[in-house]
Image: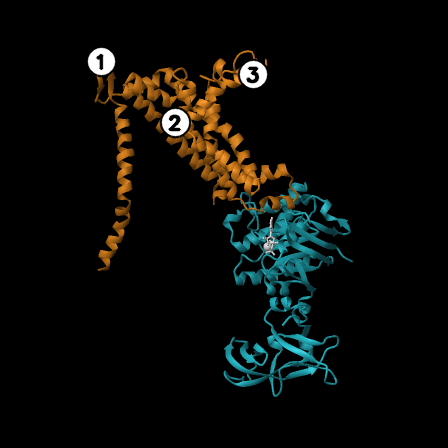
Chain colours: A cyan, B orange
Amino acid sequence: MAYLELDRVAKQFGAQTVVDDFSLAVGKGEFISFLGPSGCGKTTTLQMIAGFLDPTRGAIRLEDKDLTAIHPAKRGLGIVFQSYALFPHMTAAENVAFGLEMRNVPRADRAERVRAALAMVGLAGYEDRHPRRMSGGQQQRVALARALVIKPSVLLLDEPLSNLDAKLREEMQIELRQIQRTIGTTTILVTHDQNEAMSLSDRIVVMSQGRIEQIGTPQETYEKPASAFVSQFLGKTNDFAGTIDRTATPVRLVAGSWSAPAPAGLSGPVTVSIRPERIGFGDAGLGAKILTRIFQGNHWLFQCDSECGPAIVIRQNDGKPQPTEGEAVRLTWRPEDMSVRARTGG
Amino acid sequence: MSTVAEERNARAPWALTAPALMLFVGVLLIPLAMTVMLSFHDWGQYKGIEPVFILKNWQEIATDPYYAEMFRRTFRIAILTTLLTALLGAPEAYILNRMSGRWKSFFLLVILGPLLISVVARTLGWALLFGGNNGLVNKLLMSLGVIRSPIPFMFTETGMVVALAHVMMPFMVLSVWAALQRLDPQIENAAMSLGAGPVTIIRRIIMPQIMPGVLSGAIIVFSLSASAFATPAIIGGRRLKVAATLAYDEFLNTLNWPLGAAVATLLLVALVLIVVGSNALIERRYAEVFR
Ligand SMILES: Nc1ncnc2c1ncn2[C@@H]1O[C@H](COP(=O)(O)OP(=O)(O)O)[C@@H](O)[C@H]1O
Ligand SMILES: [Mg+2]
């Protein structure tokens, strides 16, 4: 049963439609990511859930109650902003205590909960520090503690890790996931970083230009992208132009010299999407020439010129000899590793 | 070779700032020092200024209650003006900051516009509105029967405070405005999401953060009001004197330059002490907000 539900939500600023037809059902305890390029409407959607913006159309329900009818101050959601928006004139403990104070939690109880919340995010002993005297990572943790201490029904995170350096970001990702698993708060994360979305979420909502492109588990969106946009956005991918040959029996899917039994329900020109790490070198298949070969430690990256245009191949560095630059190769893959879509236009 | 280059490098900043430094010394420090020296000279109705070193002027200021009253009035007016600008200017800046694009620029212009008009013109405007029986507002209110006699404005401290506050308002608004620009744009949303209502947000979140702006605006307004000349001269005339108008009168009417210099020096020293002192206090108190 859906805990938080967005039903055909849309937002317009003047004539510009920023979010359109956004429907999503979030289960209790689920970790959802909104993933998409900058400007696609992720923050706008999050702010509509938070109540800082009113949807132009559609409904938002929490446990079947209309959330849009509730004032943002009464929604009881925990929000971590991209800039953290900590109160600079208050210490870490005062920042975290603020939400409890607003809820009239008794002083002694408050102190205990603040201490526990700061300890949970690894900031025990930092109670009396002011935000400006903390590092970005520490401020981020204070913001998380401040949002979590009020036991929010839903935790909303707007690019919370984008201001951290790469190493710290990875650490925080792991920590965030652990904290979320422990306390089980339903969480929505906004991000433009596909690795972050994939490593943290139960499900990913891929967005483009205010619309949902696909909703699915990280694996589904990566391996069975619903659109060219999704496959391009979630990591590297090869798109080959192919055709379904109906004259052959059984019907075959042909891309250059590569062919396989055609999937049902398609005909004519198609696009074959295949991840670089799912392509192997074989005796038969798509003809290609290796242009460059890049060693990247645990794997090799090959850039090839194939019959169907440029192709990239990633091979595990398993110690076996690999083709060299300039070598002619054949690219093969298993039919179940590719996704095939009807090709429109050219 | 390198030492020559280094030496030249070390001298470069001095060489580059020398013209400005010389101007600063020439037009500010030297006249200032001369004013201080002047305050120790003697003066007589018929003998004029005598370049001797005596404490006569300072003794007169210290013992004659007239001067104490006049300095008290000067600072009372400055303090009230500062309070009035803070009370009106801070909310004004806050509201202005919340307006949307086009209105914001328009009202900012309205607020800063007066800076383009001479203080004399602006103060005379007040005099036209409230000046005695002929003031426009007074005439109107009297003809409507709201008041019987004209609202006392000219030659009153209230009038001076109101006119000065009007003149000084842009400085307060700009100062608070600058502090508001430093706020995180999401800070109010953050407080709201934690359950704070609009009053709590202003009292607990916004006010503490713009306080440094209000206080630095207050320092500017206070020092400008305490040393203001044109407005007190027009509203107060020769009847209600403040330090600046008194010094002016001593210099140009009585021609007792040494006494005028002593008044001016005392005003300057008092202002410097107050400004430096409160600045240090503010910076210590709001170290976290300033960083
Ligand atoms: N208050 C606003 N008024 C007008 N346009 C806005 C406003 N807020 C956001 N937008 C526009 O909506 C689009 C989506 O913005 P946003 O939701 O912030 O994107 P994202 O968070 O995915 O980067 C952008 O094109 C942005 O310019
Ligand atoms: Mg955003």
Task: Tell me the kind of residue under disc 3.
Answer: Leu
Q: Is mark 1 on a helix, strand or loop?
A: loop
Please tell me how crowded label 3 is: few (under 14), some (14-19), or many (20+) other residues with Cα within 10 Å.
some
Q: Earlier in the sequence, mark 2 or mark 1?
A: 1
- What's the residue type where badge 1 is placed? Tyr
State the separation of the CA atoms marked 2 and 1. 31 Å
State the residue position of label 1.
Answer: B46
Q: Which chain carries label 1?
A: B
Percent x, y of residue B168 = 45, 30
Q: Earlier in the sequence, mark 2 or mark 3?
A: 3
Inter-mark Cα distance, 2 to 3: 33 Å
Position of residue A331 measured from the top left corner of the image (x, y, whole percent): 60, 82
> Can you tell which mark lies on residue A346?
none
Q: What element carries label 2?
A: loop
| Residue at which label 3 appears | B141
Horizontal and vertical percent position of residue B101: 55, 43
